[in-house]
Amino acid sequence: MSPNYRILFLAPTGFFADYGCHVRIRGQAEALQARGHQVLICTYPGGRDLPGLTTVRPPLWPRGREMPVGSSWLKLALDAALTPTAFVAALRFHPHLVHAFLHEGALIGAALARLLRCPLIFDFQGSLTAEMLDHRFISERSPFLRPLRWLEQHINRWPAAVLASSYHAVRLLTEEHGLPPGRVQALPDSVDAAHFRPPDEQERAALVELRRSLAIPAGRRLVVYLGLLAEYQGIDLLLHAARILADDYPHLAPHLLVMGFPFVDRYRRQAAALGLAERVTFTGKIPYEDAPRVLALGDVAVAPKLSATEGSGKLLTYMAVALPVAAFDTPVHREYLGDLGIYAPPGDAAGLARALAALLDDPQDAARRGQALRQRVIAHYTWAQAAAVIEATYQAVLGESGHPVYTPDGKRKPCRKR
């Protein structure tokens, strides 16, 4: 039996919110606690508390204020507020490990791990500078880009182990950033396949009523998207693909259900300008707990994300609900969907329209792909499987299984058992 650990999660984000990295943090924490470990989450002031998870937030910051999504100058102030909160919480909690999310968390966590003389684990979800470029927070010509890349390189090297959100990220870290392969462990995003599942017959009437409440026209096939609304997520291209579908495939006449935030009004105006006001429904933020029910309305799911380094956890929710998926052809999308996805060249709206049309035009093949994708999730991408990988990593860095242990400066040393 493995030992039980006290684990300090450093989450420099407004946990919990209903998207991406928050779902990853939540899934890991709940799965680790189910295996008998104690998890304390240090996070920003925003977000909502979840039953069963203990969170600590900076005390001198107003609650309820909207937290930034992605790169923002406000995060510097939030990180400054989070740092002393994390130090005080750690001194009280006495963690065996510091498990940091995002590069800001790893930066704070490195200092904290040195103080406590415990290992730092870094959950790597994508390149810091690539995200800033994706969000147009900085440009390729910015004088800050080179020093930020230097900082990112050093942050990547400090942890005792790095948990990378995809095998593509493992290659990025080992081949481009030069990390020793033994220091990097692939930990793909996962999903609760009992929560996200296809609807049963008893739920059909409620789904009909839900569809009516969203004013989705009767008889139309439905394409669903769930995630953040931003240019790097491909929402602009998705709307152009919807216009092409309406023009070039009138016999399919699909309706598009776009679920997520922020910038809902901006994209609603863009849809109207494209003549899609009657073909697209924007719901705004969908609570995580409600997401399976709304996804179950769909016939086809779409993943237009363009980022070359970030994960794409939304795919797993689609797959678990047994939805066939049309996606841009990126390494991370290929990793999750394999040969079961229908792909378009990245950035090609017409190609995305063709991929969606292929699924909509052959419902039997689409259903086969959806069922196979759900089986792929159950076989490879559950939180219980992820927790086992995380626990093995903890054992390795703490010396429980005889593996080498790394200090924050990258040197190997024997580890005292705690």
Image (cartoon, grey):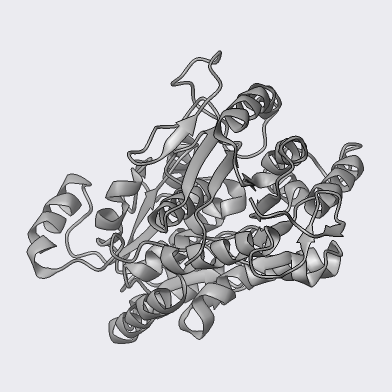
Q: Residue at x 24, y 55 (%)?
A: 293
Q: Where is residue 98 in the image (x, y as percent from the top left)?
A: 64, 45
Q: Which residue is drawn at 64% across and 57% down?
A: 310
- Is 143 drawn above or below residue 183 in the view shown? above
Q: Where is residue 88 in the image (x, y as percent from the top left)?
A: 62, 24
- Is 134 drawn above or below residue 58 in the view shown? below
Which residue occupies the foreground of this view, 278 or 338?
338
User: Within the image, what quadrant is residue 52 found in?
Assistant: top left
Which residue occupies the foreground of this view, 282 or 317?
317
Q: Position of residue 256 (x, y in %)?
A: 36, 57
User: Within the image, what quadrant is residue 111 found in?
Assistant: top right
Q: Is residue 308 at all visible to an observer of this figure?
A: no
Q: Residue at x 55, y 34 (%)?
A: 93
- Is 157 drawn above or below residue 6 in the view shown? below
Which residue occupies the foreground of this view, 96 or 48?
96
- Is 101 drawn above or below residue 224 in the view shown? above
Number of callouts: 0
Which residue occupies the foreground of this view, 306 or 177?
177
107 relative to 92 in the view: left or right: right
Q: Is residue 313 at all visible to an observer of this figure?
A: yes
Q: Where is residue 91 in the image (x, y as percent from the top left)?
A: 62, 29
Q: Which residue is drawn at 58% across and 75% down?
A: 335
Q: Residue furthest front?
A: 417
